[in-house]
Amino acid sequence: SSSSASSSASSSTSTSRANAASSALASGTKKSTVRAFWELSRAHRPIGTYLLFWPCAWGATLGAPAAIFSAAAWPTMSDLLSDASWADLLSASPGTEYALLLLQFAAGAWVMRGAGCIVNDLWDQRIDAQVERTRARPLASGALSRRQAYLSLLAHLAAGLCVAVPLGWEVFGLAASSLLLVGVYPAMKRVFDYPQAVLSLCMSWGALVGYLAASPDTALQLPALLLFAGSAAHCLLYDSVYALQDARDDARIGVRSSALSLGPNRLRPALLGFATATTALSALAAHCADAFALPFVALWVPASAFLFYQAATATAQNAQRLFECNQYYGLLLWLALLFGRAALATAEEEQEQPRPEAIE
């Protein structure tokens, strides 16, 4: 009898331990799956989101009406300290619409960057498994199935639709047209010596979308086209630098890139050329959109200096670090355009104000 009771207790303990182990395993599997979906969209590496967002912000800043950037468009300190609620002050400010538009673009950049990464991984699953830097990605490592990746892609596209439709059908149509480039880019790495040229169109498309979304015009103007070209040159620069770290693996498995195609003798001059084009085109865009003022120049000069430093010093060893620093270039250029437009808009507003008559 006591032997039977002891056996029963031992069996119960073993069952409890088995259940606990099973529960822990299930919990660990769930956590690892969630982590895999997170990494599939590169949410743990937000640099791509920043690089996709900044052209949108640049475009919106050049396309928005000048009245948004004048000093009168924003609440003053005395307004904020008055009895009026901040909500009323912000709702009455023309600048609020611009700020909300930037938030929409930030959400859209996060979602669509994730979608682009999933498309890329679906194309490159076998290639990624052969490259040291990418073999741990969820599809290449087998942490997620292709079916799971397609479901995640649909979720990202649905979220992107929710962000883009409120911007208007013209803006939505322009934004949606970039999906063809997103889908084609991974194939270009197999058949085209300079796939970064296609990627530069994808990453810079937001400059056109941002301008059209913020502009009272229904067509793209010269500043938008100049900004788009400058942004594309910037992408050619930073993604050619980025490609340096995979050059050996790419050459071994037959993946093409500008870093390989240009070779060691032509790569440095090409990078300097991309830096020059980015610098010149951003300045021309600012000039055509009434943003080329002293505050613009004060920020544009150090931002441009970084581009030339990047072009002159890039190697396979520092490629990742230099690549990630381009997010700060994006921030500096946005601030340059913002303060440049604000300075000229405020100066123009002051000139239009009637001067007090001289006292006789």
Image: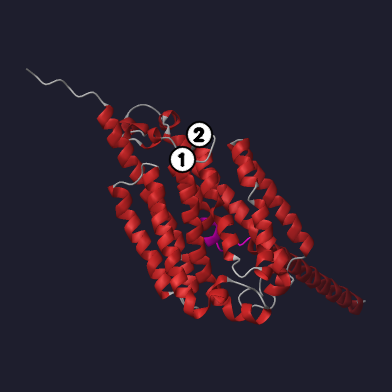
Residue drawn at (66%, 65%) of the image: 188
Total residue callouts: 2
Q: Does residue 47 belong to the magenta stretch?
A: yes
Measuring from the top left, give residue 103's x and y in whole percent: 51, 44
Q: Does residue 44 belong to the magenta stretch?
A: yes
Secondary structure that dominates the magenta span:
loop
Amino acid at circle 1? Gly
> Mark 1 and 2 residues: CB-CB less than 8 Å, in contact?
yes
Q: Residue furthest left?
A: 360
> Where's the N terminus, which quadrant?
bottom right
Measuring from the top left, give residue 248's x and y in whole percent: 59, 81
Question: Which residue range is magenta in the image?
Answer: 41-50
For marks 1 and 2, give the CA distance.
9 Å
> Where's the C terminus, which quadrant?
top left
Is 285 situated left or right of 172 in this image?
left
Amino acid at circle 2? Asp
Q: Is residue 91 above or below residue 58?
A: above
User: To which residue does mark 2 refer?
Assistant: 217
Q: Residue furthest top?
A: 360
Is 18 situated left or right of 160 in this image?
right
Measuring from the top left, give residue 253's x and y in whole percent: 68, 79
Which one is nearer the viewer's eye here, 19 or 12? Answer: 19
Q: Which mark is residue 63?
A: 1
Is 271 situated left or right of 160 in this image?
left
Q: Can residue 306 be seen from the camera position used here?
A: yes
Helix, strand or loop for disc 2: loop
Is 244 situated left or right of 130 in this image?
left
Which one is nearer the viewer's eye here, 115 or 6? Answer: 115
* Between discs 1 and 2, the one toward the N terminus: 1
